[in-house]
Amino acid sequence: MEFRAEEWGRQGATLSDKTARSEYGLTQDEIFAAIDAGKLQYRPAAMHGNPWLRLLRREVEDLVRTGHGERYLQERKARTELAQINRELKQLRAQLAALEERRAALLADLAAPGDHQA
């Protein structure tokens, strides 16, 4: 039972019901049916007064694997990772553009003649 308690606290081991719906293509009805059947454990949570369910990622993946197959699960995980990578690349490109703009401004300031006395 200690492992179960540790699992709830480990980063990345849990996800919200909303994330389970978006990442794994589950419906809210499928999630509730799995909870009622004892296939999914949950912990109620709330943020800013909005309730949501914390689910164990391992159990959600098992549910998707049994309901839709291993290939479907791997495809959903790959699509989710690809979306994350695309978001990170977009952020990095924006940072790079800002840094290049700042670099150009600094180089222009350094190349400007004669405001400084030696």
Image: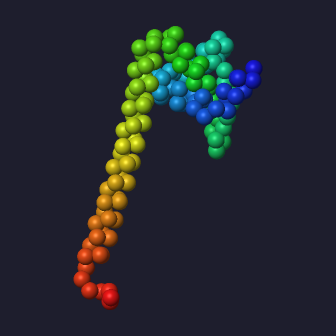
Q: Where residue 91 sits in the image (x, y, percent)?
A: 39, 48
Q: Look at 28% across and 70% down and name the residue there.
A: 107
Q: Nearer the viewer, residue 9 or 25?
A: 9
Residue 116 relative to residue 80: left or right: left
- Seen at 67% across and 29% down, the residue is 8
Query: Vertical placement of 92 versus 25: above or below?
Result: below
Residue 16 appearing in the image: no
Residue 88 is drawn in which quadrant? top left
Identify whether 93 is placed above or below 24: below
Percent across and percent down for residue 113 are: 24, 83
Q: Name the one closer to the observer, 15 or 113.
A: 113
Task: Identify the image quadrant of the N terminus.
Answer: top right
Q: Position of residue 104 (x, y in %)?
A: 28, 66
**Closer to us: 78 or 112:** 112
The number of discs equals 0
Q: Is residue 102 visible?
A: yes
The answer to whether 113 appears left or right of 93 in the picture is: left
At x 64%, y 41%, the residue is 47
Vertical order, 66 against 83 (above or below): above
- Residue 84, percent from left and from top: 42, 36
Q: In the rendered view of the protein, which quadrant contains the C terminus?
A: bottom left
Seen from this angle, which residue lies furthest right? Answer: 1
Choose top left, top right, bottom left or bottom right for residue 54. Answer: top right
Say how the picture is coloured. rainbow
| 17 up-or-down from 111: above or below | above
In the picture as drawn, the residue positioned furthest to the front comes out as 118
Q: Residue placed at 45% from the left, 18% from the top?
A: 73
Where residue 77 sits, quadrant-wise, is top left
